[in-house]
Image: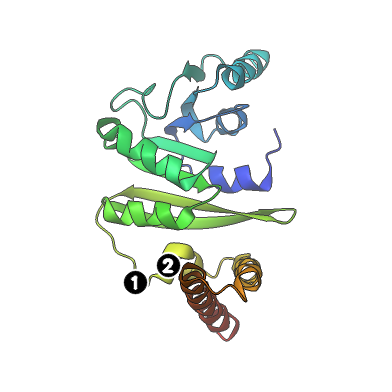
Amino acid sequence: MRLSNRLLEIVNFVPKNSIVADVGTDHGYIPIHLIESGISKKVIATDISKNSLDKTIAYVEELDLVNYIETRLGDGLRPIGLNEVDTVIMAGMGGILIRDILEKDKDIRDSIAHFIFQPMVASSELRRYLVENDFQIIDEGLAREDDKFYEIIYAKRGKSSIGKNINYEIGERLIEKRHPLLVEFLRYKIDILEKVLRELEGKESSKSRARYLEIHRLKEEFQEVLLSIEGS
């Protein structure tokens, strides 16, 4: 099956011959691709929504993949047994929700070797949680679909640190490997910050002024990263 750019970038991080849990699987596109392409030996597809999981079940049965893809209804990591999978994918949900799922079931979390996250929002909060809770960010990716960018974070358990605060906003691995979409992504982020600054202009409350200065500093940090990449 043909995946979107976002889903393709996600599956590119899945280790070969892995046993995977796709948490919040929705239509089940990732599990089906992992099995059909021979990347994974087995996939557990979970979702908190019965309607979403029913779509996955129907698709898996239609393709005769029931021996390779198991479907389970439940919240977060709870449908997964200890040491049952080596890789977990959480895609298409917010970074705060991903953080909360990881925090809620630590025993299951700590039995998993590989983590692939695609936060729709709050990627900086997710990176901060990972670094502060003994995760190593091994690699990162970007995908673009129409006018939207998506960040993918590949992590493992282990001690790590972040060099600069801006790297909670823009992953160090993206900068290190000069990801092909990084310049476009930085310009996109700067444009968003400039719009926020325009909205805050002329507002005199202390809260608005503090927010303006915070956003202005962040914009300057993004511009520094952009200049360093374009000048190298």
Q: Please tell me the numbered disc located at residue 167.
A: 2
Determine if residue 180 is in view: no
Instruction: Look at the image and tell me in which quarter the N terminus lies.
Output: top right
Give the number of the disc on residue 77: none
Based on the displayed image, in which of its 4 quarters is residue 163 positioned? bottom left
Asked which secondary structure carries label 2, the reply is: helix
**Residue 198 image-quadrant placement:** bottom right
Give the quarter of the image for residue 57. top right
The residue that appears at 49% across and 32% down in the rendered structure is 40
14 versus 202 height, above or below: above
Residue 231 position within the rendered picture, expressed as x and y whole percent measured from the top left: 58, 86
Q: Residue furthest front?
A: 205
Residue at the spot x=59%, y=28% of the render?
26
How far across and down, in percent of the image, does residue 11 sit?
55, 42
User: Does the residue at mark 2 contact the one at mark 1 (Cβ under 8 Å)?
Assistant: yes
Residue 17 visible from this viewpoint: yes
Question: Judging from the image, what secondary structure is the residue with disc 1 in?
Answer: loop
Q: Residue 189 or 11: which is nearer the viewer? A: 189
- In the displayed structure image, the side of residue 87 where residue 35 appears, left or right: right
Q: Which residue is mark 1?
A: 163
Q: Please tell me which residue is depicted at 31% across the width and 39% down the height of the picture.
A: 103
Say what amino acid the circle numbered 1 marks.
Gly
